[in-house]
Amino acid sequence: MSEQILTEHISSYVNFSEEELSEIACFFDIRSYRKKEKLLHAEKRCDTLFFVAKGCLQLYFIDDLGNPKTTQFAMETWWLTDFLAFQNQRPSNFYVETLEKSTVLSITFSKYQELLEKFPKMEKYYRAILETAYGAALMRIKYINSLSKEEMFFSFRNSFPEFVQRVPQYVLASFLGLTPEYLSEIKKK
Amino acid sequence: MSEQILTEHISSYVNFSEEELSEIACFFDIRSYRKKEKLLHAEKRCDTLFFVAKGCLQLYFIDDLGNPKTTQFAMETWWLTDFLAFQNQRPSNFYVETLEKSTVLSITFSKYQELLEKFPKMEKYYRAILETAYGAALMRIKYINSLSKEEMFFSFRNSFPEFVQRVPQYVLASFLGLTPEYLSEIKKK
DNA sequence: AATAAAAATTAAGCTGGTTTAAGAAAATCA
DNA sequence: TGATTTTCTTAAACCAGCTTAATTTTTATT
């Protein structure tokens, strides 16, 4: 079931036969995780790329004071990892953890290389995905540098209302770059 | 000369014959620009992707108060555009402008599509470039959410010392998300 | 070399957002 | 179902970084 989420997503970018799609699916491990399970540990070699079939993941780090800070969320059909560390097979700068019960497809770095070698059309798929992700990251930096914390919250809630319901408020606060206390104050208005 | 910067860069990721490389180069327009020339205008359809062969570009927007804010720099061998708008052929959210006399290779969206169709190996090149760019953007967001403005400056200067010399201080300030006045104060120490 | 324009500095007053700390509400678990 | 832990709220004191405005330095133009 879960691999179908992936193969359908791939099919919306590139044309593959049913046969090819099931071959592609074989490159991935499928696993379900409980809430708050770690899929990737900071400092450990970043060897895995994740695709969310169901549920929600976060990419986060621990700051000087020991508080977790969320850098990126990933919901259904999103890819997640520390891409820089993954590409260079270096220690990860981030943790990846479930925010809720989730089903995730994982691919190791070497399998990822094999996959791209065996199905060069997958390059096109990832190129498109990464164009979107990088473009969105540039927009996010634009927002960070132009909106107040209050505007950040309302603009985010406006774009992703379901999402604001779905994740704990202190996680959302750390993603938006403000304190849970201040977020609480903003919501009061 | 300038197309060689591009073809050498491509060659460091993917193997192409000399012939193929010169065919690839034909998809691009090469032009030199003076300092402070606009290559892409906000609100106008984002139809072009830029590669810096020489010099330096910035991606920026104008905030509520009319001040330009730099979101991204691009130096030699970097690619730049509003990737989200480019991909969807929508109006750009950013301006692209030279920070110094620069030589730039430009490719339109339709030529980019043709290029990828004719040379599918270029998908691999762009996939790799975008993996790096997106990975770096995640790291940048990590820095924004963990360093003070002062630490931002020293950490940036530590990583890119030549660059700090190269761009005007008020542009650097807007890129780092602080005021020129405060940056000046930080440097005094 | 003189003039004008752009960029950088300095300093004082101010504010958006943090910190700290304690209590209330909600979720989880035996 | 009650006990425990986790999450959310409230409020006051505080500060990193901004605003404003005037001066100096640097760069560009003739």
Image: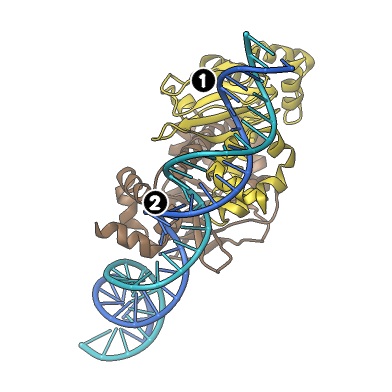
Chain colours: A yellow, B brown, C cyan, D blue
Decide if residue A117 is on the left or right side of residue B57: right
Question: What is the number of callouts on the image?
Answer: 2
Q: Quadrant of the C terminus of chain A?
A: bottom right
Decide if residue A55 is on the left or right side of residue B63: right
Please tell me whether mark 1 sits on a helix, a strand or a loop. strand
Please tell me whether mark 2 sits on a helix, a strand or a loop. helix
Q: Amino acid at mark 2?
A: Lys
Q: Quadrant of the rendered structure where residue B35 is?
A: bottom left
Name the residue rendered at 49%, 24% in the picture. Answer: A86
Q: Position of residue B156 (x, y in %)?
A: 36, 47
Task: Work out whether A160 lies above or below A34.
Answer: below
Q: Front-most of B77 and A161?
A: A161
Name the residue rendered at 30%, 44% in the picture. Answer: B158
Q: For the residues carrying marks 1 and 2, which lies nearer the camera in this image?
A: 2
Query: Where is mark 2, residue-wise?
Result: B149
Q: Which mark is residue A118?
A: none
Distance from disc 1 to disc 2, alpha carbons, whole Å, reads: 29 Å
Q: Quadrant of the N terminus of chain A?
A: top right
Task: Work out whether A12 lies above or below B52.
Answer: above
Within 10 Å of disc 2 (Cα), the crowding (few <14, some 14-19, many 20+) is some
Q: Position of residue A140 (x, y in %)?
A: 58, 47
Q: Amino acid at mark 1?
A: Leu
Q: Position of residue B171 (x, y in %)?
A: 42, 60
Tag 1 subunit: A
Tell me if I can see residue A39 in this picture: yes
Q: Front-most of D2 and A96?
A: D2
Tell me if I can see residue A127 in this picture: no
Q: Front-most of B120 and A144?
A: A144
Name the residue rendered at 47%, 20% in the picture. Answer: A41
Within 10 Å of disc 1 (Cα), the crowding (few <14, some 14-19, many 20+) is many
Query: Where is mark 1, residue-wise?
Result: A40
Q: Front-most of B95 and C23?
A: C23
